[in-house]
Image: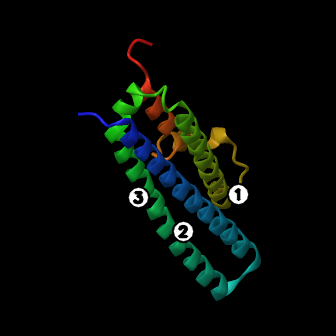
Amino acid sequence: MGFTISEISFKMRFLMEVLERKLKALEEIYNITENQEFFEKTLFGEDKDILLQEAIKEKQKIIDEVIAADNTFMKVFGEFKGDLNRNKDKFKDDIKKMQDKIRKVSDIDFKIRAKELRAKQGVKVTPDVLSPKIKTLKSSKSYILDKYRKNTQRPDL
């Protein structure tokens, strides 16, 4: 029993909403990370400690939301990837939009990780510095795009 075109379309829209929520959450994390950097440079003593602790708590809450979004995405995508593969010509535009959204998510994810690493190590971070770490993350561009490509390739290609 496969999914109908209508059901696949619904699931694709749902996944786009999940990616949009993840993108917004990552933007919040980026803003919090920038605030942490500002606190580190401009504040001293107890005020600094309190604000940094609050920022870390808020960031952890949002990170949990990002992880939940990742899990939801992978679960739902796994449910219908075969049906999507069989109908990929009908969903070519939707697939491209999803891939573009995944690239945006990955870009901001990289910016966050680079900012965090710079803050911890005080070094300039390039993609080469983070690539081993990024490759291991569920939310990384290469992981999701590779996973998608592997699951949507026709066996005869």
Mark 3 element type: helix
Q: Residue 59 location in percent, x, y?
A: 54, 68
Marker disc for residue 132 = none
How many numbered marks does the figure carry? 3
Q: Residue 118 location in percent, x, y?
A: 68, 56
Disc nearer the start of the sequence (1/2): 2
Q: CA distance from mark 1 to mark 2?
A: 21 Å
Marker disc for residue 59 = 2
Q: Amino acid at mark 3?
A: Ala
Q: CA distance from mark 3 to mark 1?
A: 31 Å
Q: CA distance from mark 3 to mark 2?
A: 14 Å
Question: Which image quadrant is residue 27 in?
Answer: bottom right
Q: Is residue 131 above or below residue 117?
A: above
Q: What residue is at 64 percent from the left and 38 percent from the top?
A: 128
Mark 2 element type: helix
Colour style of the rendered protein structure: rainbow
Q: Relative to the observer, which residue lies in front, 143 or 156?
A: 156
The reply to whether discs 1 and 2 touch (Cβ–Cβ < 8 Å) is: no
Q: Residue 77 location in percent, x, y?
A: 39, 42
Horizontally, residue 99 falls left or right of residue 78, namely right
Q: Relative to the observer, which residue lies in front, 94 or 56?
A: 94
Q: Which residue is mark 3?
A: 68
Disc nearer the start of the sequence (3/1): 3
Q: What residue is at 45 percent from the left and 51 percent from the top?
A: 14
Disc nearer the start of the sequence (3/2): 2
Depth check, mark 1 against mark 2: the one in front is 2
Q: Amino acid at mark 2?
A: Lys
Q: Relative to the observer, which residue lies in front, 139 or 125?
A: 139
Depth check, mark 3 against mark 2: the one in front is 3
Q: Which residue is mark 1?
A: 122
Horizontally, residue 47 falls left or right of residue 90, namely right
